[in-house]
Amino acid sequence: MAQEKKYAKPLPHLDEENRPWWEALKRHELYLQKCRDCAAIRYYPRAQCPECLSPRTEWVRASGRGKVYTFTATWQNQAAGFRESLPYVMAYVQLDEGPKMLTNIIDCGPEQVKIGMPVEVVYEDVTAEVTLAKFRPAR
Amino acid sequence: MSISRKAAVAGVYEHPTRFAPDKTMYQIMAESARGALDDAGLTIKDVDGLFTTGIGMGAMGIVGFCDYLNLTPNYLDSTSIGGSSFVAHTGHAAGAIASGLCEVALIVYGSSAASQRFAVGTGGFGGSLDPCDQYEMPFGVTTVGSYAMIAQRHMHEYGTTAQQLAEIAVTMRLHASMNPQAKYRDPITVEDVLASRIISSPLHLLDCCIISDGGGALVVTSAARARGLKKKPVYILGSGEAVRHAARGARDFLEIAAAQSGRLAFERAGVTHKDIDMAMVYDSFTITVLATLENLGFCKRGEGGAFVSGGRLRFDGELPLNTDGGGLSSNHPGMRGIFLVIEAARQLRGECGPRQVKDCKIALAHGTGGTLGTRHSGATLILTNQ
């Protein structure tokens, strides 16, 4: 669906360090990393635990559920792809597993978004390679 | 080793331009350097330490600037941590001078952000390969949006209001009205701020700093040498710097870098909050001021809304703040840190005319660089004329 028109928003750079995370999103699965040595959970994905530098990592499937921690309705952004989609809601969602993720709240008007509102993940396939984890009000 | 009172700001210059389509960035930097050296009574041949960075410079911009001015300094520092960089440079210069690595430090900045029509706060980000950016850029992060999320959270946790944030903008405009160089000088009211359009909720247009051209420079030298120069020395008492970021997903977003950099600067300066006669706090947005004052410890967390109200931040109030009109009304050429130190020094020298703070002996400058809602730096400096 997204392939019909050229996707104008910035795309993430995929590399060997983050590819498993993006490949999971492609399968519509959201993962977090957990250190096998000190048990710290981390987001975004990276090769070593930032707490203890251990490279021993476990991938933990996230529920995809959380709450809006904070948000803003953006009414001005000159960048291509965004200037055509104003206003949009940018938010931090705190996942039930703990980490806060920067994302967009979709499928509702900006005036409906409230801090603390329960949300659930929506997988948006934006290109053949990239799927983004966005969130909508929990159903 | 303490750097306290080992070095002093001996020369300052704020470029008067706010819009200079006829000038290049390097030209504005060179004119600023000349101004600060003239102010100190020194020449470019005296400079043996150079500190600079900029939004329009290449990765080795400091070397290019040396080429441009035919400089061969003994000490180079292009620490680039956002708009706070020049506050950090001043602390670094004091350290370098105190340890004998250089004697006359030139700190310089210039930008033609306005005439080149940079969308500084609302342009979005793209193209970075830094890991952190890959999880933010796709969602339309803007500078103003990042700060707006801090404001939204502060309102949620503490009941802070848009009116309280607007009071900050109104006070900055009052100060700008007393600064002939300020870009916007007509008084505004809280109602004007609230009636201006929303850029990124809950921040209105008048909650946001302006975009201008401009530049400035500082000359820092040893305390002993400064005492023999043209102007009254402004001694560096203490400095601190810090960063805050996503913290692997576990960040408390209302704790900002100022909490750490401020604590360090106060400890190193050996002064307390009640000793501060005036403060220069980076005002990229109204929320930046409120969050910074809380994190520096001028009030408790959550009390910022009440603290900034009732005229406390006016030049004749309890904590005079940004007496030049700040980034909200005077100038904001992409990065603003250098002007925080310049106005603090002018206040400590008693050069501020109608906006002069009475009996100003100790001033604090705090720069925030980057974006509060994703990652940022903070640099704090405490200065005195005593």
Image (cartoon, coloured by chain):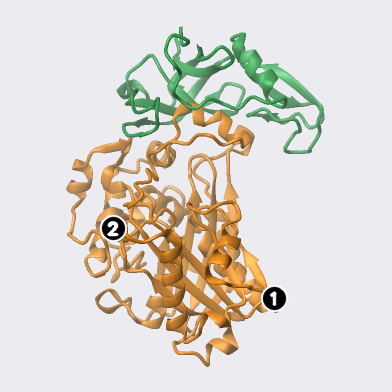
Q: Which residue is mark 2?
A: B329
Question: Is residue A128 among what the camera can see?
Answer: yes
Tell which subunit mark 1 falls on.
Answer: B
Which amino acid type corresponds to the residue marked 1 in the rendered image?
A: Leu
Q: Does residue B277 appear in the picture of this structure?
A: no
Q: Which residue is the site of mark 1?
A: B101
User: Would residue A101 be found to the left or right of residue A44 on screen?
Assistant: left
Secondary element type, mark 2: helix
Chain ID of residue with mark 2: B
Q: Nearest to the eye among marks 2 and 1: give it.
A: 1
- The answer to whether the residues at label 2 and label 1 have Cβ atoms under 8 Å apart is no
Pick whichever of labels 2 and 1 is earlier in the sequence: 1
Q: Quadrant of the N terminus of chain B?
A: bottom right
Q: Position of residue A116 (x, y in %)?
A: 44, 25
Which residue shows up at 52% across the image and 39% down it?
Answer: B374
Residue A92, position in %: x, y?
A: 49, 29
Bin the neighbour count of mark 1 within 10 Å (Cα to Cα): few under 14, some 14-19, many 20 and up: some
Kind of residue sitting beneath label 2: Ser
Which shade is chain B? orange
The answer to whether tags 2 and 1 share a subunit is yes
Q: Residue at x 31, y 65 (%)?
A: B17
Return the residue found at the far bottom: B228
Residue A73: name its quadrant: top left
Of all chains in the rendering, the one displayed in green is: A
Q: Is residue B301 left or right of residue A83?
A: right
For the point 27% across and 68% down, the residue is B181
